[in-house]
Image: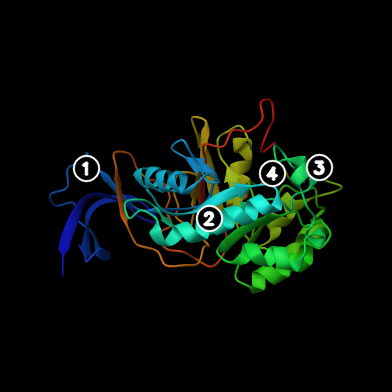
Amino acid sequence: MTTHTVTGRLVLDDRVAPGRVSIDDGLITAVDVDATGVPEDAAYIAPGLVDVHVHGWGGHDAMGDRDALDGMARALLRRGVTSFLPTAVTAPLDDLTAFAERVRSWMPSAPGDGAEPLGFNLEGPFLADARRGAHDQMQLRAPADVSPETIETLTDGLRLLTVAPELAGATDLIGALSRAGVAVSLGHSAALVDEARKAFAAGASSTTHLFNAMSGFEHRSPGLAVAALLEDDAYVELIADGIHVHPTLWELITRRCRRVAMHGRRDRHARRLGHRPRYRGPERGRHRGPATGRSRRRQSQSPRPARDHGSRPYSRGPTSGSRGARRWPRGSSRDA
């Protein structure tokens, strides 16, 4: 047995405290809060992030080739992400099928010095035209217009899918995927509140970037955002960069919701940061992500505190994510 101890400032559920972590054969066996021998400026120690919505990172496109996936995995690990879901955007169904096959075949040989792939995420093509953002209008589809056989080719390894609940066939698709263990996130939608509630009742468990590219708080015609905030068992995602959603709403969201996935922009990319159900505010909290599968429990040290983590897969709801190398059309607003 190989044993070693890491000392520093521990990022815990409710505070940051000096202490040490004991590791036996690569597994964390003890976490002890103890200031003895820990310098005040010691490195922060936090569990790794689980990134379930990432279109690219480090100059690598999630929909690229195996080399791009290798580079993306290694670049994510350097940012404290220990497992992730490569995420596709709306594209021709043949392209999405090829993406799914490419990720599936790549996963067994993914680099050991990179973040571990847990499957893949599809943001599209089942999105509403009225709230498509920068997704390709010509490639949008209603679930009812896609054969079960085609959908079946996508489900092996699929861990998370965004669906607009008002589309024809959406409720049936949500129910079928939920029963198959795939987490469904509602988004890019103009649904009314009753349509959204039916989708949550059918098995949807999250939203994709709350308020952005979805119907919201119109007082006479509430939409998906209201349904999400009223759904006790659902996760919501929030792009907390101060631009996509006004900071005044953050407190409302975190007061109402027990499950929040926080998104923050860094440079031209987005880092989506997850939180545990007992969320305590935008500066702290942890969360275990939804993706099923084996996860190596790695540890991350950083000169700055890692605000969030997801050290093991969970059964539902998105956690962290990063928007990376894919370029969106000039002048478009992807998450408007």
Which numbered disc flags the more N-terminal residue, 1 or 3?
A: 1
Q: Amino acid at mark 3?
A: Ala
The picture places residue 239, in percent across and down from the top left corner, at: 58, 41
Q: Are marks 4 and 2 in contact (CB under 8 Å)?
A: no
Which numbered disc flags the more N-terminal residue, 4 or 2?
A: 2
Quadrant assignment for the C terminus? top right
Question: Which of labels 1 and 3 is toward the front?
Answer: 3
224 to the left or right of 84:
right
Which residue occupies the foreground of this view, 291 or 68?
A: 68
Which numbered disc flags the more N-terminal residue, 1 or 4?
A: 1
Question: Which of labels 3 and 4 is toward the front?
Answer: 3
Element type where label 2 sits in the image: helix
Q: Amino acid at mark 4?
A: Phe
The picture places residue 193, in percent across and down from the top left corner, at: 80, 55
Label 2: which residue? Answer: 102
Label 1: which residue? Answer: 42
How far apart, in angstroms, are the residues tagged by discs 1 and 2? 41 Å
